[in-house]
Amino acid sequence: MADSCSLIPQGVFVTDLALSTMWGVKRFETLAEFFKQGSALGFTQFELNHAIDSTMLQNVNGYRVVSVHEPCPADVSVGELKKRNWLISAPNERDRREGVNAIKRSIDLAQKFGASAVIVHPGKIDVDPAMNNRLHEWYRQGKRAAPEYTRLRDQFVAARAAQARVNFSAARHSVIELAEYAGERGVRLGLENRYHYFEIPSPDELGDLLELGFANVGFWYDVGHAETWDQLGFVAHEEWLRRFAARIIGVHLHDVVGVDDHRAAGTGNVNWEMVARYLPAAAMRTCEFQNNNSPEQITAGVKWLIEKGCVRQ
């Protein structure tokens, strides 16, 4: 964590909204300073994101942690897990086991802090990311409607489908094991829709995982990720909500400009009125704003979410 910020605006007190430590990473020198500033902005509960390692956790003290984003504690970083393919979707059993163990550590941490949910990334489909990267590049260049964009997107969809069975089978096996482990500890698992199209789950894959029948497994709806898939032409944002609103246990609230996500709510393309129509009253709500959002933008984003009906004050 880095630069401290001494002056912040008056916050908006909210009772059902958490702030992710994503906002504090590389912004404040310590996690304690993040909690202090977040509390001053009106937040009474927090989510530990996947950049928080064990050395930072001593600063949690008496603050209320309601959710944990695996692989927190990130003593093995997200980047390192991906580099080694230590993911719950890995076909190699040793690699898959490392991914499962990382999430089990997050479940244990949630139990320790009394957090009710762990947000889970269910892995990825092993396809060449070059097509994904090119699509993002062309989108940023304004080529979304170009025939070559459509052809490449269709090729990417086909490549993902051809490889999906192997990786999804591993992910499904892992989710079963993790659901049982979490259930024994009174923790819910929220399966999150992801930013990149090669990642798990697609809507159909999410449906399959939710149909496993575990009462403690639900959908962790990421607004910005759903919007990004829509912007790129893969899946309409509202499809996730039409199909799975009843299974939403939590939501990451952030806005998107084009395909640039984790912006404060109200600064991008998201149709927040649509989001509000589908959000269950009991769903956990977390502002997952990047650290480059100012305190003023955080406060304005919270006010926007209240105004649009996504959050109760």
Image (spheres, rainbow, N blue to C red):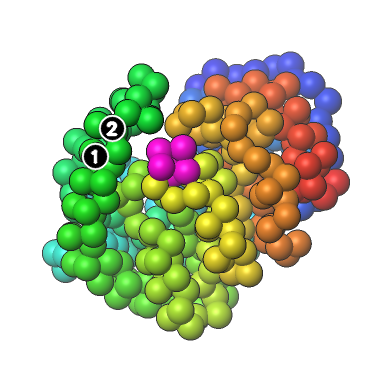
The residue under the point 51% across, 72% down is 217
Q: Which numbered marker is on residue 229?
A: none
The residue under the point 36% across, 44% down is 196
Pinpoint residue 89: horizontal percent, then vertical percent: 26, 62
The residue under the point 69% across, 42% down is 272
Residue 40 lies left or right of residue 81; in this view the side is right
Rendering quarter of residue 281? bottom right
The residue under the point 48% across, 29% down is 258
Residues shaded magenta:
228-233
Residue 125 lies left or right of residue 178; in this view the side is left
Q: Is residue 82 above or below residue 295?
A: below
Residue 76 lies left or right of residue 167; in this view the side is right
Is 263 within the magenta? no
Q: Which residue is mark 1?
A: 151
Pinpoint residue 48: horizontal percent, then vertical percent: 54, 47
The answer to which of 249 and 13 lies nearer the viewer is 249
Q: Which residue is mark 2?
A: 147
Amino acid found under the numbered disc labelled 1: Arg
